[in-house]
Image (cartoon, rainbow, N blue to C red):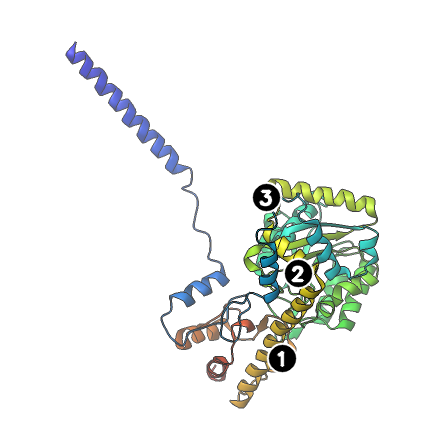
């Protein structure tokens, strides 16, 4: 009996070990096909910058505002709004469509304070997870209700635009935008692409401060674009990530949208408070779609909420409370308008300073495009090889497409940056 017991125990041990081996082998095979994802080019720049021990290092890759000491900024209006919110409001779930007050105030910024479309309740709008979330919700909405459509995206554009529409399984086409030789807008090619696209196509447009180029159409060019959209029956989806941050005037920065509205277009808009209120980590935004009438707007909003439900159920509350508190209070809104102009003016000032420093160094190249462009970014025209030299020899970090984040430039480093740029571009 003792021998039999030992044999049974042995067999059981073998079965357990075999079972463990089988489970281990089976489990490990589940994810064997997963390869590491490619590094995000922008986040990779920041990682390399942080790892560099050089005291001279400069980061002009980050897409977030910095003050003249290179430090992150929390606006006074945001601090005051948070003070008022603290301890006074609960943290219950928001509806699927988000904060009604935040959405109402946000629509006024885009469509106009006294917009007839707001009064007539023709706008379907929901709070989103900043501008990225608004774009993704719209892309999914487009796929669900216009399954045979595609999206025209400018060359170049913010890299995540491609990811968003790709993951929503919307086919992508591109249209001409940037002209490398002039470092400005390739307007004639852009217009040709609009004319040659199939009638009723979807186009992604940057409302202002085009990312990454900083190149915007003039008001007259926007009018021509709007007219051609009307002729072709195209749908314009505006990504407006920099309202107020570009020129310092929110109404001026929404001019492209207002032109399309005046011309009778039904449009979609993505809005974000990351840049213009500095609420980067709060992920506060809005997606809106202008509809035929109130009945259609109710239907569209219900479908946007249905899309949001399995993604994240409902959006976060704190950032929405901050925005609605600021925009709903005349004094706080006045303070915000003052502070957003300060940010925009500092960026504009750094553009002038960088150009002046390069010209004083006797650079053989024209740097006029630095001040012609607008917003957070300058498309410098430097090659990937020149950018690599900036990093290797001068500890200056930016994306390899030559995009400079103007927010990373300060009065303390602009001279050093200009010297380095002059060195790598003059000896090319």
Instruction: Please tell me which residue is depicted at 60% across the width and 62% down the height of the picture.
Output: 80
Which mark is drawn over residue 140?
A: none
Q: How far is the residue under mark 1 from the one under mark 2?
A: 31 Å
The span from disc 3 to disc 2 (Cα, nearest Å) is 25 Å
- In this image, 56 relative to 236: left or right? left
Outermost front residue:
88
Disc on res. 326: 2
Percent across and percent down for residue 97 are: 68, 46
Q: Which residue is mark 3?
A: 312
Which sits in the foreground, 343 or 235? 343
Can residue 337 be seen?
yes
* Above/below status of 148 relative to 209: above
Q: Earlier in the sequence, mark 1 or mark 3?
A: 3
Q: Secondary structure at mark 3?
A: helix
Q: Of the numbered discs in the image, which one, if any, rests on residue 371? A: 1
Judging depth in this view, the residue of 322 and 273 nearest the camera is: 322
Which of the two discs, 1 and 2, labels the residue nearer the N terminus? 2
Within 10 Å of disc 1 (Cα), the crowding (few <14, some 14-19, many 20+) is some
Q: Earlier in the sequence, mark 3 or mark 2?
A: 3
Q: Position of residue 307 (x, y in %)?
A: 66, 42
Residue at image coords 60%, 46%:
90
> Could you say where residue 150 lies in the image, as x and y percent from the top left?
69, 51
Q: Name the residue nearer the viewer: 109 or 368.
A: 109
């Amino acid at each position: 009996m003792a021998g039999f017991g030992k044999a049974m125990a042995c067999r059981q041990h073998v079965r357990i070990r075999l079972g463990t081996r089988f489970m281990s082998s089976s489990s490990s095979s589940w994810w064997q096909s997963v390869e590491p994802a490619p590094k995000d080019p922008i986040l990779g720049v920041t990682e390399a910058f942080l790892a560099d021990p050089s005291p001279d290092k400069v980061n002009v890759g980050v897409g977030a505002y910095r003050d003249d000491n290179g430090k992150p900024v929390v606006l006074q209006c945001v601090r005051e709004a948070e003070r008022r919110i603290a301890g006074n409001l609960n943290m219950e779930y928001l509806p699927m469509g988000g904060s009604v007050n935040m959405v109402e105030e946000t629509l006024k910024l885009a469509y106009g304070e006294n917009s007839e479309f707001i009064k007539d309740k023709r706008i379907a709008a929901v709070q989103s997870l900043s501008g990225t979330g608004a774009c993704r919700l719209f892309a999914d909405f487009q796929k669900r209700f216009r399954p045979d459509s595609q999206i025209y995206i400018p060359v170049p554009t913010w890299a995540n635009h491609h990811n968003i529409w790709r993951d929503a399984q919307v086919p992508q086409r591109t249209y001409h935008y940037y002209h490398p030789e002039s470092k400005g807008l390739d307007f004639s090619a852009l217009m040709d692409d609009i004319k040659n696209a199939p009638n009723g196509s979807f186009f992604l447009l940057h409302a202002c401060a085009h990312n990454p180029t900083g190149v915007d159409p003039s008001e007259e060019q926007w009018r021509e674009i709007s007219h051609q959209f009307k002729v072709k029956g195209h749908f314009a989806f505006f990504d407006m990530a920099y309202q107020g941050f570009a020129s310092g005037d929110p109404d001026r920065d929404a001019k492209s949208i207002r032109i399309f509205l005046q011309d009778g277009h039904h449009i979609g808009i993505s809005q974000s408070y990351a840049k213009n209120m500095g609420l980067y980590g709060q992920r506060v935004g809005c997606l809106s779609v202008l509809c035929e009438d109130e009945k259609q707007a109710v239907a569209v909003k219900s479908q946007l909420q249905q899309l949001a439900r399995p993604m994240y159920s409902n959006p976060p509350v704190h950032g929405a409370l901050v925005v609605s508190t600021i925009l709903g209070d005349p004094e706080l809104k006045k303070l915000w308008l003052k502070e957003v102009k300060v940010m925009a003016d500092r960026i504009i000032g750094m553009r002038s300073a960088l150009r002046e420093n390069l010209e004083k160094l006797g650079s053989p190249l024209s740097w006029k495009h630095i001040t012609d462009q607008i917003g957070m970014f300058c498309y410098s025209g430097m090659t990937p090889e020149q950018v690599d030299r900036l990093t290797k020899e001068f500890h200056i970090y930016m994306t390899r497409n030559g995009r400079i984040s103007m927010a990373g430039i300060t009065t303390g480093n602009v001279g050093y940056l200009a010297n380095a740029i002059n060195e790598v571009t003059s000896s090319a």
